[in-house]
Image (spheres, rainbow, N blue to C red):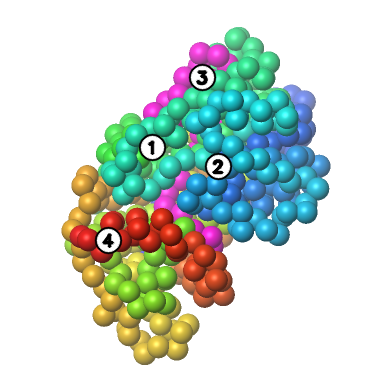
Amino acid sequence: MHLFFPNVIFKKINSVTFGKDFRHKNINEFMKNILISGGAGFIGSHVVRKFVEKYPDKNIINLDALTYAGNLENLRDLENAPNYFFEKADITQIEELKQVFEKHQPDAVIHLAAESHVDRSIQDPMAFIKTNVQGTANLLNLCRDFWSLNPEYSHGNFPNYRENLFYHISTDEVYGSLGEEGYFVETTPYDPKSPYSASKAASDHLVRAYGNTYGLPFIISNCSNNYGPNQFPEKLIPLCISNILNQKPLPIYGDGKYTRDWLYVLDHAEAIETIFRKGKIAETYNIGGFNEWKNIDLIKELIRQVDEKLGNPEGASEKLLTFVKDRPGHDRRYAIDATKINRELGWKPSVTFEEGLSQTIDWYLENEEWLKNVTSGTYLEYYKKQYLSR
């Protein structure tokens, strides 16, 4: 059994009071322009869609540099939505960002733009420092310039209502690696082990520092491994689906017993919207799927489902399993305790891992053209270097 709920009490929370005259239904009434960085990426595109559909009275600005993982095809269905706006800009370029801020005057920023693949961070750590650290600092500085911040709100003395919000999306990898037991909670000390997680940890610290020093209203959430539709096939699940379809090896690092908690991306988007609407300023929320799987067990479950959907004999694709040399500094186990967001905000995952995986496989099988379009050019060169030469 892979589904686990540590100390979670599932109960519906009907309302959260944010001071005498403010309740969560009005908490964002002052926020008319919401900027979402990295909105053409995997998680970001699902968040953009969620906000465009849920907030038709607000302007949703999708800011993305359209690097290899950014794909506007993910949002083709929103192109004509009256409250959706796209701006191509790089968060590492302050003048590009400033033009977007001057044009749209965002009241809130949901910051997802990031370099996020550990293997790439090992190859090119400076790209991660530039995007994840410098890029986050650029956004924070522009928010300081464009928002009216009250220095009395420094040191965590934030009011119970808000007119602005910097919501920073981060990862559970900032906490480091777990042993056989235990879970990451919001107060777990940071102990990043890779250039990627170190750069994200640095960005988390910057966000908290700007809140403490300048009174910038912020919230941070740390999530576990995401999976689902539109994920770029450098990540484990879409990579294996693609390779089964093309009868290529399924690369497994080390002994295959590295353990991760898995979060369906649509559940993550729902959690982000819930935190944006109901979360408390200066708080951190862990978001997890309550699903722990060893990589080898996950891939075998994926093989079982894909073979069944393709009409292949049971286990036919297991011959593709290929153990490859481990990557440097590989964290053994991640596991999120998401009790706080459930208890305080009423969020919980909507699907089990097996259900979410089935829906994910269906999406990729129905969108093979999308998969072919993204698995070309520079991605193929990266794939060859990362896996085929090991």
Q: Tags 2 and 4 in contact by the CB under 8 Å rule?
A: no
Mark 2 Cα within 10 Å, few/some/many (few <14, many 20+)?
A: many
The span picked out in magenta is: 202-231
| Among the two numbered marks 4 and 3 on one chain, the one whose residue lies closer to the N terminus | 3
Quadrant of image for the N terminus: bottom left
| Among the two numbered marks 4 and 1 on one chain, the one whose residue lies closer to the N terminus | 1
Q: What's under tag 4, amino acid-wise? A: Tyr
| Among the two numbered marks 2 and 3 on one chain, the one whose residue lies closer to the N terminus | 2
Mark 1 Cα within 10 Å, few/some/many (few <14, many 20+)?
A: some
Tell me the residue at 41%/57% (across/down): 379
Q: What's under tag 3, amino acid-wise? A: Tyr
Tell whether position 205 is magenta. yes
Pick the residue in front: 359 or 162: 359
Alpha carbon distance from label 4 to label 1: 21 Å
Pick the residue in front: 26 or 64: 64
In the image, which disc is placed on residue 387?
A: 4
Helix, strand or loop at label 1? It is helix
Q: Position of residue 225 (x, y in %)?
A: 42, 52
Tell me the residue at 78%/45% (across/down): 83
Pick the residue in front: 247 or 358: 247
Alpha carbon distance from label 3 to label 1: 23 Å
Residue under label 2: 65
| Among the two numbered marks 2 and 4 on one chain, the one whose residue lies closer to the N terminus | 2
Observer-side mark, 3 or 1, equals 1
Residue under label 1: 127
| Among the two numbered marks 3 and 1 on one chain, the one whose residue lies closer to the N terminus | 1
Observer-side mark, 2 or 3, equals 2
Residue under label 3: 210
Helix, strand or loop at label 3? It is helix
